[in-house]
Amino acid sequence: MSSTASKPARTHVQTGPEVEAWAERLRVANINPRTGLATDYLNHFNEAVMLLEMVPDMPECAEDFLTWTPLSYAEHFTASNFKARDLAIEAYEKADPDVRAQFDHITDTMTSILTAVGSAMREVEKDTTRVRLAEQAALWVKPLIAACGGIINGGAEADVDTIMANSAG
């Protein structure tokens, strides 16, 4: 069995009216036509970081962060007011599997961090501990959001381990 049998056939450069029309639909909808991904999904994580960044000045905001719920890409768009939400989900499903796997790996990492921090915040009683958790989580997640933005916009591969090591501050 050849290696081409295990992967769908893809041409390196696809052209033609259908491909151009698809790319234009994505562009108009604010979805990157090269990757099939939309930066709107990052708002989901930016919201969590914004709440975390408020905790040091207003510890009671930890309660607001604890209402944050992880959402997959499709769940986010299904629940959003994004005009082209169905197109965003379809484009994600059609995205290059390697790009999508890298994107999903980073978003899964962010979700794991935020979920773990939420669990830890629920367990502690001291505001100072919640503040430290919030500060550390924001330091970890912000560079991952930037890395996801790079993937969405067709940038180079991101190495989660390197990002995490550099943000361990």
Image (cartoon, rainbow, N blue to C red):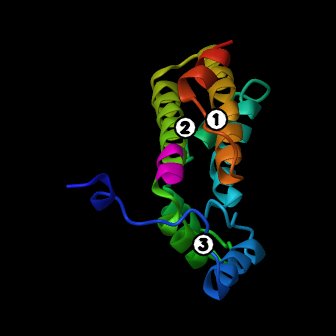
Earlier in the chain: of badge 3 and badge 2, it is 3
What residue is at 63 percent from the left and 26 percent from the top? Answer: 140
Q: For the residue carrying disc 3, how many other residues have a C-alpha within 10 Å: few (<14), some (14-19), or many (20+)? A: few
The percent coordinates of residue 133 (x first, y second) are 60, 21
Residue 89, compared with residue 71, is above or below; it is: below
Disc 3 is placed on an element classified as loop
**Are circles 1 and 2 on residues that touch, CB within 8 Å?**
yes
| Quadrant (top left/top right/bottom left/bottom right) for the C terminus | top right
Residue sitting at the far front: 2
What residue is at 75 percent from the left and 68 percent from the top? Answer: 30
Q: Quadrant of residue 14?
A: bottom right
The residue wearing badge 3 is 14
**Camera sees residue 82:** yes
- Give, as a three-letter code, the residue at label 1: Leu
The residue wearing badge 1 is 144
Residue sitting at the far right: 57
Disc 2 is placed on an element classified as helix
Q: Label 3 vs label 2: CA separation?
A: 33 Å
Residue 44, compared with residue 55, is above or below; it is: below
